[in-house]
Image: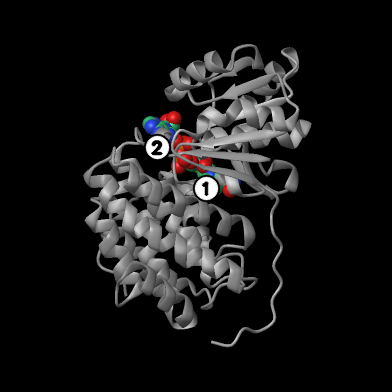
Amino acid sequence: MAVSGFTYTGLPARVVFGQGTLAKLPEELERLGASRALVLATPQQEAEARALADRLGPRAAGVFAGAVMHTPVEVSERALALAREIGADVTVAVGGGSTIGLGKAIALRTDLPQIAVPTTYAGSEMTPIVGETAGGEKTTQRSLAVLPEVVIYDVDLTLSLPPALSATSGMNAIAHAVEALYAPEGNPIVSLMAEEAIGALARGLPRVVAAPRDVEARSDALYGAWLCGACLGLVGMALHHKLCHVLGGSFGLPHAETHTVVLPHAAAYNARGAAEAMRRTAKALGAENAPRGLYTLAKSLGAPLALRDLGLKEEDLDRAAEIAARAPYPNPVPIERAAIRRLLADAWAGTPPG
Ligand code: NAD
């Protein structure tokens, strides 16, 4: 296909990728001129955070292991108070999107540099986006101030990610790449990353689920997740992300699982307006048809396939469709409430897409 005009804006981030790369953390702190790190984690990953702080010795000024989903401002303010009290000059977030979100919330208020050490495939570390919750409402904003300066991908840290979470976190990542392929501001560079990302995850995830400590499989998956995060950071998302936002925000459905269930159905909805994106997705999946290929991949990973299994009630479908169709946004196929209702009904029942 001939290349037509496009605009590409690169995001400044240093990425250190590999096995055992966490050992490079002291070097990376030095490069930033930082010597008082506040290490962030969830309560579930506190032991990892403390072990890391021990390894850093005097360069670690404190540990805050209170990160939770959806970045509530009360939690960010407690972490911020600790950062000020100990005179932190950098944050080191070890964990998934929730922990990295906390580092971003601190950066938004202080401009402290961040080193992100991702342990899931969510991709937040590559984006200038921060979502925060206040008074039960989640708002999202974009600012270069929240883009981590350094990202250390250490494959070893993902070996403990349970197979079920690896599967849904990986499908969540693939969703960023699929939507990047049909984003209005998409470009050939982002598409290259997206196709490579889907291929790496489609190759890696089945092996990860079969053998969670297979380092090569984990490397493929983490490499794919990085590229998916880059896609999310570079271009806007559409119907799929909107639906997941509604299902998470208004109905309390779990983040990665919801992405996994909705993705094949959102792709089927958009297929007729995004033929080239579907061709590239299918090619990367090694499938004939992109929505079916995504459904088959999720199924082969033993991931959830139906919204009803995630706690959505059938009587909620009307309201979900109504909220999702309310505000217009760019999408390859026009958003029509009745068609969205059918999409959601398929996703609720878990039938194959389309
Ligand atoms: P998460 O960060 O909430 O992690 C889920 C659980 O898994 C936590 O208990 C965590 O401690 C644990 N965990 C993480 N890594 C592990 C490992 N290797 N081994 C064992 N346990 C591990 O989940 P997530 O899916 O990574 O992130 C979801 C959040 O990130 C959502 O709030 C989402 O909105 C946000 N997010 C934001 C962006 C962005 O660009 N701003 C992008 C993607 C996701």
User: What residue did someone put label 1 on?
Assistant: 123
Q: Is the distance from the Cβ of mark 1 to the nearest ligand 1 atom less than 8 Å?
A: yes
Q: Is residue 57 above or below residue 190?
A: above
Q: Quadrant of the C terminus?
A: bottom left
Q: Please tell me which residue is depicted at 66% across the width and 47% down the height of the picture.
A: 13
Q: Is 82 on the left-hand or right-hand side of 277?
A: right
Residue 172: % across, % down: 43, 52
* Residue 177 seen in the current view: yes
Q: Amino acid at mark 2?
A: Thr
Residue 36 lies, in percent from the top left, at 70, 18
Work out whether 80 lies above or below 166: above
Across and down, in percent, residue 178 comes to 47, 66
Please tell me which residue lies in front, 321 or 15: 15
Residue picked out by circle 2: 158
User: Is 69 rendered above or below residue 139?
Assistant: above
Question: Which one is in front in this view, the residue at disc 2 or the one at disc 1?
Answer: 2
Residue toward you, 121 or 324: 121
Residues packed near mark 2 inside 10 Å, few (<14), some (14 to 19) or many (20 plus): many
Locate residue 261 relative to residue 117 in the image: left or right: left
Q: Dot 2: what SS?
A: helix
| Residue 311 at least partly seen | no
Instruction: Tell me which label, 2 or 1, sits earlier in the chain.
Output: 1
Residue shown at the point (47%, 55%) measured from the top left: 244
Q: Is mark 2 within 8 Å of ligand 1?
A: yes
Residue plotted at (38% across, 69% down): 284
Image location (x, y in percent) of residue 307: 32, 54
Q: Amino acid at mark 1?
A: Gly
